[in-house]
C-alpha cells in the first residue's frame, strides 16, 4: 500500500511540473507582489459599432423649350358673317309736296305691319337729298301728328294744338291735310276717310279745291285731293 501511494504522489508531482512548464512561467523560490491591477483590465469590454448613413439628394431641372408654330401651316380663319335680314318688308307710299303746290307720291321700304304713326313720321321727315334736288318738300313739321285711331273705315288723326298756328296760309294747310289723307288711304282698303281733331275736337280742313268738308263729321277722302292737287294716278 505504501508503494502505491508513493507512486501516486510522484505522478501528481510530474503532472504539476508539466503544467507549470507549459505556461511559460518560471517557478520562483519565494512569493512576490505583482502590484495593483491596471484600470479596466478587470471589467467587461463593450464593443460599439457606429454606422454612418449617407443620403444622396438628386435635383431634377426641367427646361421648357418654346415651340414655334408657323402660321403658314395653320388653316385659314373664317370670320363669321352676319346673315342677311329675312324679316318681311313692304312698300309704303307717302306723299310730298312739289312746287307750285302739288302732291307727289314716293315709295319707302318699311317692315311689314309698320304702324300708321310710324308711316306719318316718314311724311313729317324731310325728303332724301335726290328728292330735295328734284324740288320735293314736306308741309308737315315733326310732331304735328299726335295719335291715330281707326274705326268704321275712318281714321281719326289728332293734331298738335299748335297745328293751326304753324300754317302760314290756307293753301299750306290744304297741302298738310292732303299729305296725311293720301298717305293713310293708300295703306289699304281699311281706311276710306280721314277726320282731323285738335285736342279731341273735330276741325275742318280745306279740301283740294279750297272748300271745307261737307260731311257732318268733317271728314275728307282721297277724292277731295286727287286729281285736284295730286300728280300721278289716283
Image (cartoon, rainbow, N blue to C red):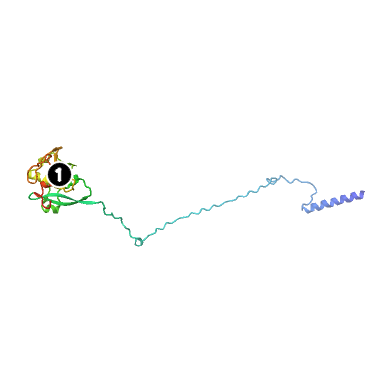
Q: Which residue is drawn at 14% across and 44% down?
A: 193
Where residue 69 appears, as percent x and y from the top left, is 37, 60
Q: Judge from the rendering whether residue 34 lies leftward or rightward of residue 169; answer left or right.
A: right
Q: Nearer the viewer, residue 225 or 78?
A: 225
Q: Nearer the viewer, residue 164 or 5?
A: 164
- Secondary structure, mark 1, is strand
Q: Residue at x 21, y 51 (%)?
A: 90
> Which residue bears the numbered disc 1?
193
Q: Can residue 8 be seen in this view?
A: yes
Where residue 195 appears, as percent x and y from the top left, is 14, 41
The crowd level at tag 1 (other Cα within 10 Å; few <14, some 14-19, many 20+) is many
Q: Is residue 169 visible?
A: no
Q: Is residue 83 above or below residue 120?
A: below
Where residue 233 appears, as percent x and y from the top left, is 12, 52
Q: Which residue is drawn at 92% across and 48% down?
A: 2
Where residue 175 appears, as percent x and y from the top left, is 10, 46
State the residue lying farthest toward the bottom.
72
Amino acid at each position: 500500500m505504501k508503494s502505491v501511494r508513493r507512486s501516486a504522489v510522484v505522478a501528481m508531482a510530474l503532472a504539476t511540473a508539466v503544467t507549470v512548464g507549459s505556461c511559460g512561467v518560471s517557478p520562483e523560490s519565494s512569493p512576490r507582489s505583482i502590484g495593483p491591477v491596471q484600470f479596466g483590465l478587470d471589467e467587461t469590454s463593450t464593443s460599439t459599432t457606429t454606422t454612418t448613413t449617407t443620403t444622396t439628394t438628386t435635383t431634377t431641372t426641367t427646361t421648357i423649350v418654346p415651340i414655334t408654330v408657323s402660321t403658314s401651316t395653320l388653316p385659314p380663319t373664317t370670320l363669321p358673317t352676319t346673315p342677311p335680314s329675312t324679316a318681311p318688308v313692304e312698300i309704303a307710299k307717302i306723299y310730298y309736296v312739289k312746287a307750285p303746290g302739288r302732291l307727289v307720291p314716293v315709295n319707302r321700304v318699311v317692315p311689314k305691319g309698320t304702324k300708321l304713326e310710324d308711316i306719318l313720321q316718314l311724311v313729317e321727315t324731310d325728303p332724301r337729298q335726290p328728292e330735295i334736288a328734284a324740288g320735293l318738300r314736306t308741309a308737315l313739321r315733326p310732331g304735328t301728328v299726335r295719335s291715330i285711331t281707326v274705326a268704321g273705315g275712318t281714321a281719326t288723326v289728332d293734331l298738335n294744338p299748335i297745328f293751326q298756328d304753324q300754317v302760314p296760309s290756307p293753301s299750306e294747310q290744304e297741302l298738310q291735310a292732303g299729305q296725311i289723307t293720301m298717305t293713310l288711304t293708300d295703306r289699304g282698303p281699311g281706311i276710306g276717310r280721314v277726320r282731323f281733331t285738335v285736342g279731341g275736337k273735330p276741325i275742318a280742313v280745306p279740301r283740294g279745291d279750297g272748300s271745307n268738308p261737307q260731311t257732318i263729321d268733317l271728314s275728307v277722302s282721297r277724292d277731295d285731293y286727287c286729281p285736284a292737287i295730286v300728280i300721278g294716278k289716283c
